[in-house]
Image: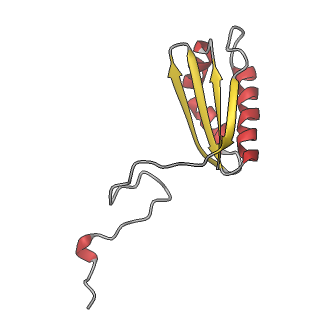
Amino acid sequence: MYAVLRRYTNAAKLVEAMDRRSQDVEDMLSSVPGFVAYHAIRSGDSLVTVSVCRDRSGTDETTRRAAQWVRENVPTGGPSAPEITGGEVFIGFGAPQKPGASSSATATATPDASSVRPSL
């Protein structure tokens, strides 16, 4: 997997536009082949976005689409060009999922203890 971080400064207008059109942002980025995840982190007047894809061509495409979206949707006075850092993900993990939780479409069901028969 690959990830790319884009760090924007003077990003208040960008954050407002993304907040108003969050479904458009989701549709645009989640349709990239190999897309895995996207996060946007606001900190004061700065914004950091993280795109994760199965390969580098996916993260390159998210960067291309993000730049086009900013040009088309943020009025003058928006952020300057972002600082971009990307590379191969070499460690990745998340919180363990509780049995029965289905927060992911790819989660596998854990059998209920009452339905498991002991083997002899």
Tally the numbered discs.
0
Residue farthest to the bottom, as pictured: 120
Outermost residue, left side: 114
Q: Position of residue 41 (x, y in %)?
A: 52, 27
Pick the front one: 21 or 63: 63
| 40 sits to left or right of 113 | right
Q: Give coordinates of residue 72: x percent, y percent.
A: 74, 22
Compared with 100, 58 (above or below) is: above
| Placement of the C terminus among the 4 image quadrants | bottom left
Question: What's the colour scheme?
Answer: secondary structure
Q: In the image, what residue occupies the spot 75% across and 39% down?
A: 60
Q: Residue furthest front?
A: 90
Q: Position of residue 105 (x, y in %)?
A: 49, 56
On the question of residue 119 being in view, the answer is yes
Relative to 55, residue 86 above or below: above
Q: Residue at x 66, y 51 (%)?
A: 54
Viewer can see residue 21: no
Q: Position of residue 11 (x, y in %)?
A: 61, 15
In the image, is residue 41 above or below residue 97?
Answer: above
